[in-house]
Amino acid sequence: MKIYGVTGWKNNGKTGLMERLVAEFCERGLTVSTIKHAHHATDVDQPGTDSHRHRQAGASEVVLASAGRIAIMQELRDAAEPPLAELLARLRPVDLVLVEGYKREPHPKVEAFRQEAGTELIAPEDPNIRAVASNTAMALDRPVFDLNDTAAIADFIQIELGL
């Protein structure tokens, strides 16, 4: 599977870019999966549901299955967060896995950057960031795309990965 990341600081447009890239690559006929890293405690389950009650009772893993969706929830129970490589190994094969976050991992990435967010650009210090998608023009030693030009960003990623 080919892997490409979207990185950047909070409120710089990562999730919107991810959403648009997934749709763009799917329209191009590619199969796509995503991995999203969250720095905060997150829970896809709701208190009171049967699956939540199973987890609260101590289950290490709960599979919630229906005709339209399968969710697998794993409790780490004080174990270390699994590395990205381990999470990638759990995915079924697809043409492309887009990874949101994981700033320090060595896979190729595009950085989402909005000037008004007031954050520093990561790209100058990270050679794994192959391009920047920004809402402001800038001169860098790598390509800079308009943050909203999803097709051009997708073209760049597709060429980089040979898809």
Image: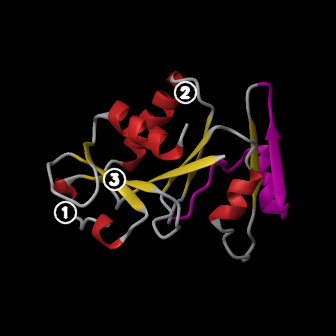
Q: Secondary structure at mark 1?
A: loop
Q: Which residues are magenta?
A: 40-67
Which residue is at 66% across, 46% downward? Answer: 1
Question: Do the numbered discs 3 and 1 sit on residues whose CB atoms are within 8 Å?
Answer: no
Of labels 3 and 1, earlier in sequence is 1
Q: Is residue 111 above or below residue 17?
A: below
Which residue is at 58% across, 23% downward? Answer: 29
Q: Secondary structure at mark 2?
A: helix
Q: Secondary structure at mark 3?
A: strand
Task: Specify whether residue 19 is painted magenta.
Answer: no
Q: Is residue 2 left or right of residue 52?
A: left
Which residue in the protein does label 1 denote?
118
Measured Cα–Cα span from mark 2 to mark 1: 33 Å
Give the camera-side residue of 104 and 70: 104
Q: Is residue 74 left or right of residue 134?
A: right
The image position of residue 47, as x and y in percent, is 67, 51
Using the rendered image of the protein, determine whether residue 52 is visible from the camera's viewpoint: no
Type of residue at label 2? Cys
Which residue in the protein does label 2 denote?
26
Measured Cα–Cα span from mark 3 to mark 2: 21 Å
Type of residue at label 1? Gly
Count residues near mark 1 (Cα–Cα under 10 Å), then give few for <14, some for 14-19, many for 20+: few
Which residue is at 34% across, 62% downward? Answer: 9
Label count reads 3
Q: Nearer the viewer, mark 3 or mark 1?
A: 3
